[in-house]
Amino acid sequence: MQENKNGIAAVPKKAKEDRYQHHDYYAIDELLNEEHILARDAVRDWVKAEVSPIIEDYADKAECPYHLFKGLAEIGAFGPSLPEKYGCGGMDEIAYGIIMQELERGDSGVRSMASVQGSLVMYPIYRFGSEEQKNHYLPKLAAGEMIGCFGLTEPDHGSNPSGMISNVKDDGDYYILNGAKMWITNSPVADIAVVWAKDEEGIIRGMILEKGMKGLSAPEIHGKWSLRASITGELIFEDVRVPKKNVLPNVAGMKGPLSCLSKARYGIAWGVIGAALDCYDSALRYSLERIQFDRPIGGFQLTQKKLAEMITEITKAQLMAWRLGTLANVGKAKPAQISMAKRNNVHTALTVAREARQILGGMGITNEYPIMRHMMNLETVLTYEGTHDIHLLITGMDITGLNAFK
């Protein structure tokens, strides 16, 4: 037994028991195939064993559980829908979504660790990279031997990424990169960064930076009240010499980063359902165990109203995600449809978390239960990868044909 700083024997913390039970009110499992179910069960078992027992402590300390990167690789969470020839899973988009859902049931930050790696780093290399780049980077990223990050958002350009000021200037076999990126998941620990910057003609280019390049730094951002178990930082470029062979050859303009964001937003639309389910599951169980006025609080009308509305909205989110997945599997999921699902499902998850917190009363604000952690995380998910309002305007532009952004 270890001793604390006062020399008193410290009693080890008891690992938290994950009592989560699956909730499928509309029998959506019947729409899934065997691969989907196997993937879900494997990731759920891993989350129960490796994430749930430790995540509250890591969130409380605002520390990232770095060791989970290797575990995420082992369960195939990095690029699960990319081809097997590059060391990836070769699964379909529904399987990818289900994996994100199970990870976020554990914690949004853990899902971010995986979705950034797969959707924002591996996907652009696969979609826009040379064969040499794919063969060099993708197997290492899939195996967790490399960790990546994605540099698009800047300190003064979030919802308007095309206004970026990060830029490259031609220097023979190199580009000279200057600028900065902000709110970058994984950047302080990343081995590579997929970065977007404007060339001298104002065309946005994607490039792969490697840790150790002179002039590249990635300071960590501290003081977050949300995604506390996820590491976030900046990317600062001071005359970084980027070999031209590191530039993604098959894309130019905003199409590149926006297609990556669509991939990530798709994963979020699935992922947040996991957070909602975890909050609902906790609230339902608590309502059946908590006695007030000589009966379980689940027997009172207002509690049942909350629970019934929660599972109704979760079911709607599940059906939207499933249909979006069927469209994605055949290449028909439009960016605007993805925006609608991301916006709706994040809002649903946050509403469920808030209602669940009320059912638990005072206990809902403690780390004995996951609800407040999910709620804080979802406040970030509400505005990253496109804010709640921006996604509304994307839908508005799609249905009217009129651009409200300018």
Image: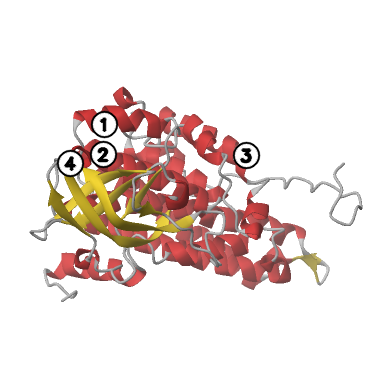
If you read the primary sequence from the N terminus, does the residue marked by circle 1 or circle 4 appear first?
A: 1
Reading the image, the residue beneath label 4 is 244
Quote the CA–CA distance across marks 1 and 3.
30 Å
The disc labelled 1 sits on which kind of residue?
Lys
* Left or right position of 58 against 68: right
Q: Which residue is mark 2?
A: 125
Earlier sequence position, callout 4 versus callout 3? 3
* Callout 4 secondary element: helix
- Whether residue 394 is visible, yes or no, is yes
Residue picked out by circle 3? 50
Check whether the beta carbons of the residues at disc 1 and disc 3 lie within 8 A of each other. Answer: no
Q: Do callouts 3 and 2 mark residues in contact (Cβ within 8 Å)?
A: no
Name which residue lies at 45% across and 34% down. 144
Which is in the foreground here, disc 3 or disc 2? Answer: 2
- Work out whether mark 1 precedes mark 3 in sequence or the reverse, and give the earlier one: 3
Q: Does label 1 or label 2 sit earlier along the sequence?
A: 2
In the foreground, 362 or 185: 185
Note whether 333 is above or below 279 in the view shown.
above
> Which residue is painted at 20% across and 29% down in the image?
131
Residue kind at label 2, given as amino acid type: Ile
